[in-house]
Image (cartoon, rainbow, N blue to C red):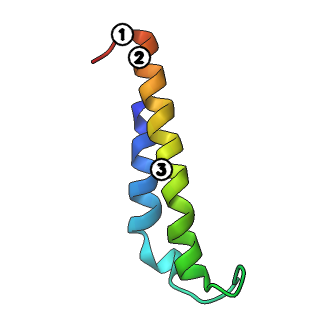
Amino acid sequence: MRYLLALPFIGLLWLPFYNRELPSLFSFPFFYWYQFAWVPLTALVIWLVYQNDRKKGAE
């Protein structure tokens, strides 16, 4: 399950994917709200991996 930790890294490393203005969300260009959306998503991924490791007894 630790492979999920690579998702935020890959999602934000691939700049040509989100280096654009449209679609906008609440008048924010895609470039900004895409990066901002990764903040809670990354926290969720880290929490999921932590919970999974805790159940398995990994440190």
Question: Residue drawn 43% across and 76% down?
Answer: 15
Q: Element at badge 2?
A: helix
**3D distance between C-alphas at marks 2 and 3:** 18 Å
The answer to which of 17 and 28 lies nearer the viewer is 28
Residue 50, by quadrant, is top left
Vertical relation: 9 (above or below) 4: below
Q: Percent from the top left, x then y, of residue 8?
A: 44, 54
Residue 13 is left or right of residue 16, and the answer is left
Q: Nearer the viewer, residue 2 or 58?
A: 58
Q: Residue 34 at x, y = what percent?
A: 56, 71
What amino acid type is highlighted by mark number 1? Gly
Residue kind at label 3, given as amino acid type: Thr
Query: Which callout, 1 or 3, points at the residue further toward the start of the chain?
Result: 3
Distance CA(mark 1)–CA(mark 2): 5 Å
Q: Residue at x 60, y 89 (%)?
A: 21
- Residue 54: mark in rendering: 2
Identify the mark at residue 57; answer none if there is no mark: 1
8 vs 25: above or below:
above
Q: Are marks 1 and 2 in contact (CB under 8 Å)?
A: yes
